[in-house]
Image (tube, rainbow, N blue to C red):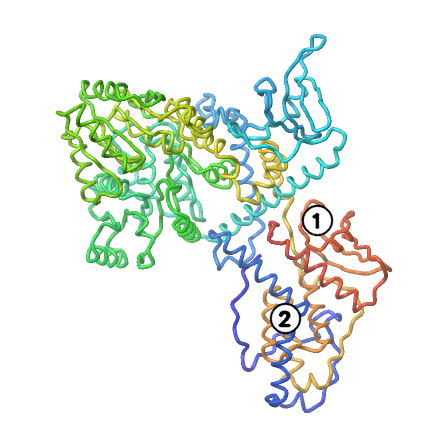
């Protein structure tokens, strides 16, 4: 639904917009006019003005309540989809929309193949079988192998509902699966179970369903399943609406720089196949598409995500635009600045700068001026770049590194940029929602799982803390000429660790770095560590963002149980980057004190020790945290109705049929309303209006344009003349009914006894989605769908005036569902 126009005062002397006789007869009014009222417009008398003010202050009527409701919905929709542009109210071209729907479906099929552990179809052009999807081994594969279930695990049978797996037992040489339900035990053959069973939870998740289903009450489960299916459909069309809005935000493709090949050739390493594909993806997004890019680059630390970003930056900057590189910490921002300064050194016309909260006011003011004037082209920094003071000359690209580490307000600000510029997000372990959007095809993603040739997997050990074991690991690394990260989560624990290390290793140079120390002191400690003067760096988790020391190949993490799974995985990626084998020792305090979640996290990080596992770690983290991390509160409740696997199955089914949820309006002029109402405006009201015929023409023209224009007209009319009399209200309601009918794809409305028939082009899926979301049970229960008609059965036959009121309320209820439908 397009955003409502701002309130604007009516023009002093509105020009005629449409003559009454240009409209269908249903709009012609019989008005009793006094002749002088047409000859001269006059100001209302003071008494009339007082009457108008009093009328305007009465309790809200049907029309004002609908106007208020629609504006509130539009505001919520606008706030919820920051990526939607305020200027994107024009309709999407059907041909463009169809092309985009095909693109979404293609991406969805790719994501589905990955989730189902299938190999990509076809070959790579060279006759070789395409490599496996990066999500091979994904925990989001839909149906479950019964032999992988553990006793007590909750499962969902598509036709029966939620039960608890008991066991697999053989009878007469045939294996059967036994499932406990609320009212008994069910058994089914293993091959049948493999086709019909789904997991209720994500792996490692222990959420209990509200209750188990009953074998003798399939109707209750069917209602739950249908409720979940409708929730999925709403979710799909909401995402589609967001991305169809993005289609309207066109921008011309960037030209490919003449020196692009030379810039690429200067990359000092041999790119991996995944990296090459990411280069191609980003280049196509920028040089071939006519809509802003919003792509995720997912790959482990050290897998070359930054080089992918720099290729995109080179394209944008070469076209005369600026690029912003946003990092969550000053350490990571400084690393990006150093890397980009070196990478663009052969292009002196491209100026790189760093901006952060650690700089003085004078430095910041000078940088802001240079950025605004266009003297700087690549601006690297922390969230300080998101300040309201920052103004760009010609910003074209935003690169966000590790978006999940920014705060809520910062993420909202980042999202607001997506409405107007190209955005590239880099992440080793994307947040669950980002991961899910990428897999479902609603967000472009390049997934890099192939390690560089020189990288060796980091050996990971998880155990209770032991001073002897920690010292043994440190001495081994120092003896082979390396350096050590010693990480603790709490600043107050650093002094004890530091004292322990100094007492045990008095001749070894040690430095400290943590968030409460001055940034310059941190930087000095890092420089000493990078130079090799310092052999052990005691630090907090700040190193997870941006310290790359080639000779640091051992990491010790104390109190590892206090870290999240994704944090442990970034942390571990900071060692073993030189081609020498790295070691990570994750020490917990006491195993008996570990929570289930902490145990699962430590087990998962030890399990995923191979390179290129960031995707799986993010997925595992989603399982540990539960599907509440993937969906919002409302959607989590919808998932809980049917379980995560069946929810995803229905999600992909709806994605593949998303075009069936499209709503195609009809022309307002083609809507036929067979209700015999001819309002007669009272002479007192006629004499009060400046130009009644012209005003009625305006009303008809507003209704023909769109509902928001009609709303604006009605509100302006009431501000100017007060609440209209009953006959004028009937006229307005008639206009509202025709306008809403047109937007709902209804071309004719006609009564027959106690029945009302509405001819429509909508399909049954749209009708079902619409009626399920209606707030009025009375209206919902009266409606049915057959063929190409919506039928409404009333209790009694109504006179035309009451019939118009009933239609106004019923269509109002239907109209508020439109935001949940894909509209052309």
Q: Nearer the viewer, mark 2 or mark 1?
A: 1
**Towards the viewer: 383 or 341:** 383
Q: Which residue appears at 70% of the width and 59% of the height? A: 811
Q: Residues within 10 Å of mark 1 (few under 14, many from 20)?
A: some
Q: Residues within 10 Å of mark 2 (few under 14, many from 20)?
A: many
Left or right of 723, for residue 294: left
Say what secondary structure mark 2 lies in.
helix
Residue 401 seen in the current view: yes
**Towards the viewer: 379 or 480:** 480
> Earlier along the polypeptide chain: callout 2 or callout 1?
2
Q: Is residue 31 above or below residue 224?
A: below
Percent position of residue 348, x then y: 20, 46
Q: In the figure, residue 729 lies in which quadrant?
A: bottom right
Q: Looking at the rendering, in which quadrant would you find the N terminus?
A: bottom right
Left or right of 443, for residue 355: left
Percent position of residue 294, x then y: 43, 44
List the single residue furthest toward the top.
Answer: 173
Residue 453 seen in the current view: no
Say what secondary structure mark 1 lies in.
helix
Inter-mark Cα distance, 2 to 1: 29 Å
Q: Is residue 784 above or below residue 514?
A: below
Residue placed under numbered mark 1 in the picture: 767
Q: Which residue appears at 35% of the width and 51% of the height? A: 396
**Towards the viewer: 591 or 733:** 591
Percent position of residue 653, x then y: 62, 36
Q: Is residue 732 above or below residue 50?
A: above
Q: Is residue 574 above or below residue 654?
A: above
**Towards the viewer: 673 or 438:** 438
Q: In the figure, residue 536 lies in which quadrant?
A: top left
Q: Which residue appears at 75% of the width and 36% of the height? A: 219
Residue placed under numbered mark 2 in the picture: 701
Q: Which residue appears at 59% of the width and 39% of the height? A: 655
């Amino acid at each position: 639904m397009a955003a409502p126009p701002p309130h604007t005062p009516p023009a002093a002397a509105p020009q005629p917009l449409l003559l009454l006789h240009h409209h269908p007869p249903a709009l012609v009014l019989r008005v009793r006019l006094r002749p002088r009222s047409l000859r001269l417009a006059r100001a209302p008398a003071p008494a009339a003005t007082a009457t108008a003010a009093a009328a305007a202050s009465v309790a809200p009527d049907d029309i004002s309540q609908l106007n208020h409701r629609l504006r509130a919905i539009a505001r919520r929709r606008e706030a919820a989809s920051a990526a939607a542009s305020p200027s994107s109210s024009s309709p999407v071209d059907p041909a463009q929309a169809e092309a985009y729907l095909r693109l979404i479906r293609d991406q969805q099929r790719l994501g589905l193949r990955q989730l189902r552990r299938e190999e990509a179809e076809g070959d790579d052009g060279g006759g070789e079988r395409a490599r496996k999807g990066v999500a091979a081994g994904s925990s989001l594969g839909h149906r479950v192998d019964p032999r992988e279930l553990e006793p007590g695990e909750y499962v969902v049978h598509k036709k029966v509902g939620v039960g608890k797996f008991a066991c697999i037992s053989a009878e007469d040489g045939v294996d059967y699966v036994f499932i406990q339900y609320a009212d008994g035990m069910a058994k089914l053959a293993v091959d049948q179970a493999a086709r019909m069973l789904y997991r209720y939870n994500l792996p490692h998740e222990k959420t209990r369903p509200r209750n188990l289903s009953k074998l003798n009450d399939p109707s209750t489960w069917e209602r739950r399943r249908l409720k979940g299916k409708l929730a999925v459909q709403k979710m799909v069309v909401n995402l589609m609406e967001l991305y169809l809005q993005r289609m309207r935000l066109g921008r011309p493709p960037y030209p490919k720089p003449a020196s692009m090949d030379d810039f690429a050739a200067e990359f000092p390493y041999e790119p991996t196949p995944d990296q090459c594909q990411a280069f191609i993806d980003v280049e196509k997004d920028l040089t071939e598409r006519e809509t802003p890019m919003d792509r995720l680059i997912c790959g482990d630390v050290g897998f070359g995500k930054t080089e992918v970003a720099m290729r995109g930056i080179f394209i944008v900057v070469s076209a005369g635009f600026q690029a912003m590189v946003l990092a969550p910490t000053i350490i990571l921002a400084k690393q990006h600045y150093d890397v980009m300064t070196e990478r663009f050194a052969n292009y002196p016309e491209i100026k790189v700068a760093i901006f952060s909260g650690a700089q003085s006011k004078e430095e910041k003011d000078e940088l802001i001026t240079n950025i605004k004037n266009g003297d700087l082209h690549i601006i690297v920094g922390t969230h300080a770049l998101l300040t309201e003071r920052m103004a760009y000359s010609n910003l074209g690209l935003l690169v966000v590194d590790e978006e999940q580490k920014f705060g809520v307000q910062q993420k909202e600000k980042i999202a607001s940029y997506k409405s107007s510029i190209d955005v590239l997000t880099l992440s080793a372990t994307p947040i669950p929602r980002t991961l899910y959007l990428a897999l479902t095809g609603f967000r472009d993603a390049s997934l890099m799982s192939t390690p560089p040739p020189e990288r060796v997997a980091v050996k990971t050990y998880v155990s209770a803390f032991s001073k002897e074991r920690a010292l043994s690991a440190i001495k081994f690394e120092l003896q082979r000429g390396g350096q050590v990260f010693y990480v603790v989560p709490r600043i107050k624990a650093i002094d004890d660790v530091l004292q322990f290390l100094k007492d045990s290793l008095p001749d070894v140079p040690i430095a400290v770095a943590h968030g409460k120390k001055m940034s310059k002191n941190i930087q000095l400690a890092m420089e000493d560590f990078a130079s090799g003067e310092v052999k052990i760096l005691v630090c907090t988790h700040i190193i997870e963002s941006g310290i790359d020391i080639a000779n640091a190949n051992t990491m010790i993490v104390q109190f590892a149980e206090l870290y999240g799974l994704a944090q442990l995985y970034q942390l571990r990626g900071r060692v073993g980057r030189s081609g020498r084998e790295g070691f990570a020792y994750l020490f917990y305090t006491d195993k008996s004190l570990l929570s289930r979640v902490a145990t699962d996290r430590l087990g998962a990080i030890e399990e995923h020790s191979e390179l290129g596992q960031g995707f799986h770690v993010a997925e595992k983290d989603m399982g540990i945290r539960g599907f509440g991390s993937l969906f919002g509160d409302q959607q989590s409740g919808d998932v809980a109705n049917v379980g995560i696997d069946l929810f995803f199955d229905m999600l992909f089914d709806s994605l593949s049929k998303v075009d069936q949820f499209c709503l195609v309006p009809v022309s307002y002029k083609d809507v036929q309303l067979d209700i015999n109402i001819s309002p007669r405006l009272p002479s007192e009201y006629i004499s009060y209006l400046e130009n009644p015929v012209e005003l009625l023409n305006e009303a008809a023209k507003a209704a023909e344009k769109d509902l928001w224009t009609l709303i604006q007209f009605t509100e302006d009319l009431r501000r100017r003349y007060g609440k209209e009399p009953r006959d004028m209200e009937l006229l307005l309601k008639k206009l509202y009914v025709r306008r809403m009918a047109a937007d709902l794809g209804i071309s004719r409305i006609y009564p027959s006894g106690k029945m009302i028939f509405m001819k429509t082009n909508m399909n049954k899926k749209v009708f079902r989605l619409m009626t399920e979301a209606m707030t009025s049970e009375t209206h919902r229960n009266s409606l049915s769908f057959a063929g190409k008609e919506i039928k409404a059965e009333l209790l009694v036959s109504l006179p035309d005036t009451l019939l118009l009121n009933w239609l106004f309320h019923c269509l109002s209820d239907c109209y508020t569902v439109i935001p949940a439908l894909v509209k052309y």
